Each structure stands twice: as C-alpha cells, then as structure tokens.
Image: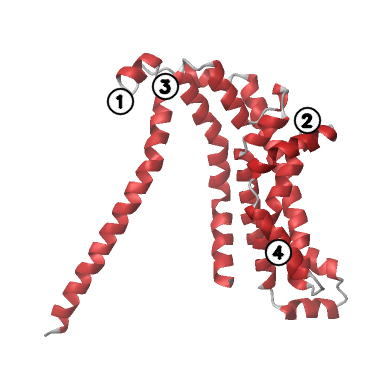
C-alpha cells in the first residue's frame, strides 16, 4: 500500500475531529451569545414587541430604555460603589495573600503545612453558611451600612484560593536568585518587594482579576450589609430595579445589559494578563 493511500484515512480523521471541535465550540458559544443578543435587542423594544416579536429586530427602536438608565444617578452611584468595593477588596486580598504565600513558599518552620492546610480548608467553607454569624459579627462591630462590612469579609473569603495560587507560583522561583540577592545584602522583605513581586506579575494579575470579578458579582453580602441605597452595588441595585419595574421587562433588560458593560470592559482589558498568568502557571507547574 502506498504512503499516499495510508495518509488519506488519517487526514479524514483529522478533518472530522476538527469539524467536531468546531461544532462543539459553536454550540457552546451560541448558549452564551444568544441570550446576550436577545437582551441587547430586547432593551430596544417595548413590552408589546417582546410579547409579539421576541426574537426579531425592534420595530420601532426604543432607545429610551437605555437612556433612562444611563441618566439615572442611582445607576452610576451603584457602579461607583461596586468599583470602590472591588478595588479595595482586591488590594487587601493580593497584598495579604502575597505576603502569606511568600512565607509558606520560601520559609521552613514547624507546623507550616498544617497552617497551610488550615487556609486550604477555607475553600470548602460555603459562604452561605457563614452569612448569619457574619451578620451578627458585623452588627456588633458597627459595620452595617459601611463599605468595610463588605470589603473585609470578601477579602477574608478570597484569601484561601489566592494564597494557594501565589504559593505555587512563588515556589517555582529558583532559589539561586534569592541566594544571590542575599549575598548582595538584600533582606528577606527586600527580596520579596524588589525581586519576587515583579517576577510574579502574571500571577498577581491573575489573582487580581479573580478577586475583582468575585467582588463585582457578589450579591448576598452587600444585600445583607447595606440598607442605605447610597452603598448598593450593581447586583443589589439590579434586584431592586427588577422589583420596582417588574412589569416593564424591556427596561429591565436594558438595565441588565448596561450592568454587564463595566465587567465586560474590564475583562477585555485584563484578558491578556489573565490568560498569560494562567498559561505561565501551567507551564511552571
């Protein structure tokens, strides 16, 4: 049998595999894109169009659903609140986790693995179970209707996964670099601040994106902590908006679409850092 005859079936198999993979990607993508397109177009309709022509183009277009939300002061206040809380949470999580991960990765001391396991157990602790005692604790500390009542618990629950990711990354840094820095008179903190953190920039970017997304999407904790509308985050504001305009589905769709825009914009900016950090961690792991 000639080489050409033997290569033909393999090419067919490769082509069939490619078609199958592309089909799966298109099916999965459609489950993501179709609801978004439906929401965007639905926001340009009125309720009558949504009931009679839910999947068609708006006729006529109703941009007032979007403009009413955009000119609403409460919407921008919620974006500002979500942004402040997300950035503060991320800063605390990354700084504290980086220092803890450095200790766990570069120092040997009695009980290190036991203490690290204690942090890892936090991954298995569901947030919903802690909400009642957490509410009592925040009330006793007078942190209700206070942004720190959301920032500090979010940071605490974000520590386990961040420490695990950063510790694994820090352990891949060659020990010879630390030895050379020590011979040059660099202190352990100096090595951590001047050398280790710049080298760990991809990992820091990855955990920062995860912390921002986790804070931005958090609904239960802000709902419990904030009674003052001035501190409502976007998820809480969306829930209240839905209750206020329960009969106006088109306006609710417009609000949902606009609430997604900041998160999508942030992801589009941070996508390269996130993928680069995950790929770097995978190669080093």
> What is the spatial separation of the Cα atoms under label 4 and label 3, in whole angstroms?
51 Å
Residue in front for this viewpoint, 225 or 117? 117
- In the image, which is nearer the foreground, mark 2 or mark 3? 2
- Return the disc, 2 or 4, that comes first in the chain's sequence: 4
Q: Which residue is mark 2?
A: 144
- Return the disc, 1 or 2, that comes first in the chain's sequence: 1
Q: Which residue is mark 4?
A: 117
- Return the disc, 4 or 3, that comes first in the chain's sequence: 3
Residues at badges 2 and 4 in contact (C-beta under 8 Å)? no
Q: Which residue is mark 1?
A: 56
Residue at (39, 19) in percent of width and height: 45
Residues at badges 4 and 3 in contact (C-beta under 8 Å)? no
Residues at badges 1 and 4 in contact (C-beta under 8 Å)? no
Residue 83 x, y percent position in the rendering: 67, 37
Query: Helix, strand or loop at disc 1?
Result: loop
Disc sitting over residue 44 in the figure:
3
- In the image, which is nearer the foreground, mark 1 or mark 4? 4
Query: Helix, strand or loop at disc 3?
Result: loop
Residue 149 x, y percent position in the rendering: 77, 36
Quadrant for the C terminus, please: bottom right
């Amino acid at each position: 049998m000639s080489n050409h005859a033997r290569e033909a079936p393999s090419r067919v198999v490769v082509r069939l595999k490619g078609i199958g993979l592309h089909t799966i990607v298109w099916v999965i993508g459609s489950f993501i894109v179709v609801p978004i397109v439906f929401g965007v177009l639905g926001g340009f309709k009125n309720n009558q169009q949504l009931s009679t022509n839910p999947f068609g183009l708006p006729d006529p277009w109703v941009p007032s659903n979007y403009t009413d939300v955009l000119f609403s002061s409460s919407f921008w206040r919620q974006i500002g609140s979500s942004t402040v809380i997300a950035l503060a949470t991320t800063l605390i999580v990354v700084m504290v986790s980086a220092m803890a991960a450095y200790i766990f990765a570069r120092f040997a001391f009695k009980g290190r693995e036991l203490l690290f396991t204690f942090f890892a157990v936090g991954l298995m602790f569901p947030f919903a179970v802690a909400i009642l005692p957490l509410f009592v604790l925040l009330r006793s500390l007078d942190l209700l209707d206070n942004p720190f009542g959301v920032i500090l618990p979010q940071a605490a629950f974000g520590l386990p996964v961040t420490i695990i990711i950063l510790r694994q990354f820090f352990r891949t840094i060659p020990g010879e670099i630390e030895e050379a820095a020590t011979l040059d008179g660099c202190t352990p903190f100096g090595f951590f601040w001047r050398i280790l953190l710049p080298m760990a920039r991809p990992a820091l970017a990855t955990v920062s994106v995860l912390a921002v997304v986790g804070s931005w999407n958090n609904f239960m904790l802000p709902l419990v902590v904030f009674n003052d509308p001035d501190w409502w985050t976007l998820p809480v504001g969306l829930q209240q908006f839905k209750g206020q305009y329960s009969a106006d589905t088109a306006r609710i769709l417009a609000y949902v679409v606009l609430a997604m825009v900041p998160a999508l914009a942030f992801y589009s900016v941070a996508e390269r850092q996130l993928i680069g950090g995950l790929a770097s961690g995978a190669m080093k792991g």
